[in-house]
Image: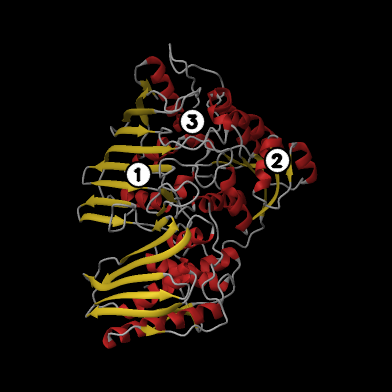
Amino acid sequence: MNLKKMNKGLDFLRDKYDAAKGEITVKDGHCYVGAVPLLPGRMERKIVELKKMTENGTLEGVSTLRFAAFVPKGADIEEVLAKELDLAAYLGASDVVRVMAAGNGEAINVLAKLANDVNVSVEVAASLPKGEAAFDRHEIIAKRGVACDQTVDTHTPHASIRCYGAKGAVEYTDVDTELFGLTYEEIWNVRAAFALLQKRADAKVWKSAWAKAVKAADLAFKADKAKTAKTIAVKKGLDTNQSIKVAEVR
Amino acid sequence: MASNLVNHVNPVKKERQYFMKAVKIAMMGMTHGHTRKYYQTLLDNKKLDWIASCAQDEDAKKTYELYQTGVPCYLDPEEMYEKHPDIEAVVIASANDKHFEQMKWCAEKGIHILSMKIPTFDMAEYDAMIEMCDKAGIVCQIELEMHYNSVVRRLKKLIADGAIGKIKSFQATNITLSPVWAFPWQGDPKASFGKVSRLKKGDERFKGGALCDHPHIFDLIRHLTGSSFDYIYAEVAPNLRDGLKVEDMLMAVGKMKDGTAFLFDPSWSRLEEKLKVPGPGWERFPKRMEVNVTITGEKGMITCDCFGPNVYHNGAPNDRYTVQYTYFDEWIGLIDEFVDCIRNKKTPLINLKWHKESIQAMLGCYESIESGKIAKI
């Protein structure tokens, strides 16, 4: 991630839409604004659309979430798993209360349970060659309807552009006109920082949500070692899975 | 090589440029299919102050009120202007045959104009529009929102950077469902094409259908090649929709002056439910709208889906497989450019003079359909 470019993008959005001052920093590979961990996954537009579908009646009676995330070799799979478990809680609108996992080196397969009885599976692997773009999949299976961020009959993401030039085939997927030129990961971190600075995202909620996700991911690895499911006590209080108001652009 | 490439908003270079007085803006007509797409942007953009709307009729006003924008809506433009004499700019969101009189109304008052994608198909009217906007010294930007699509921006960059060399062939679709059930004027030859004119001898249909809804690809090829239309040949196919007075299926082939061969599909080839107000479940085919481009160059080729990837579901209301559009922020860049042109006295990328040749190429399609021969542009 290019922090300088990201903060320039953030300054542009803050200026344009009158948001508070602030800057993105990185600690242990995770982005923050001040002491608040960013949740860029919640800002990805595909996740925003999926969340909407769980709330506006498009999907009824969510039963199971099937997630996957594949990243280049050397990436921190515990961080990746934490992100996916946070998205599971967010899209499932309920906290993770139990995790079981089977891991092997750079891969881990997790079966989790949400407090509302929804099942979650997450496959994570740091198996892509270095330099390859990471990809993921989020499928929500409900009594009425299935929603997914990959189209039917495919198992890898569709790209907006495929250019067959002198360098062979190169794919491009540009997703944000205002932040054109930033990478996918950079864009959603900037959007997450912007949401915090606009007060559309709640700092307390994100701190708490990320702490829960990190804990659940840690327990998943412990469950793998112990060959026993690990339980997480649900604490009453802050609902960390409510949707964030995202600027509607259509 | 590509020319006339858009000077897009650059998030890095444009910082601190927005300390300018908000443009007081209004909307007129409220019957165009794109009307609703402006609401969020006009409300969110701090460079704008959306102060009034004026609907064509009671029906349009009722539909407008469903969206609860909080912006007052009038039925008489004079009443709107009397109550809001500080209007600086207007989005003319009306049927094509209303554009001339509404542009004239704006030009007489020195009000800047954001026009829908077809100003008019009457070239005498078109020239008069250019003249009156020039005389009034106002900005008249044509709404071709594809230029603010991030995929198109990448496409322009790749072509400009020479990723596939000089363009040899260009194939593009601009295919959608038909909006006629929600916006009946788009199926009315007079309102859409400007006059009642048969497609060709012996054909019961009239000009004014799918072609009039899809100018983007006629524009995009000019930007990407930097060339002009040479000739065009078009054919209409049998309609998919019974009872429609205008064409819904057609294709065109032709050449640009630099030799680029092209093939266009500007059809309403995706069926729809006959909804009065667009909303979930409008589409029967999973994807409502597609702009797909394939370009062959001297050194390679590009395939491009301007509205993908997305997310997908088969939930409510119709339990059919459906594309839920995900990346869709063209209106933000479009409005940013409009405000920039007004405040900084710039000429919009898509202005009346530039757009004229695209309209002429579309008219060439109708001419070819009628004659069965190529139309020189």
Which of the 4 quarters of the picture holds residue B33?
top right
Proximity of marks 2 and 1: CB atoms separated by less than 8 Å:
no
User: Mark 3 sits on what residue?
Assistant: B212
**Horizontal relation, residue B30 to residue B123: left or right:** right
Element at label 2:
strand
Separation of marks 3 and 2 at Cα, in angstroms: 24 Å
Q: Nearer the viewer, residue A125 or B330?
A: A125
Q: Looking at the picture, does residue A45 appear above or below residue B126? A: below
Q: Name the residue under label 1.
A: B2
Q: Which of A86 and A202 is in front in this view?
A: A86
Labels 3 and 1 positioned on one and the same chain = yes
Q: Is residue B161 visible?
A: no
Cα separation, mark 3 vs mark 1, equals: 26 Å
Question: First in sequence: mark 2 or mark 1?
Answer: 1
x then y, percent, for residue A243: 53, 67
x then y, percent, for residue B314:
42, 51
Query: According to the image, label 2 marks what residue?
Result: B54
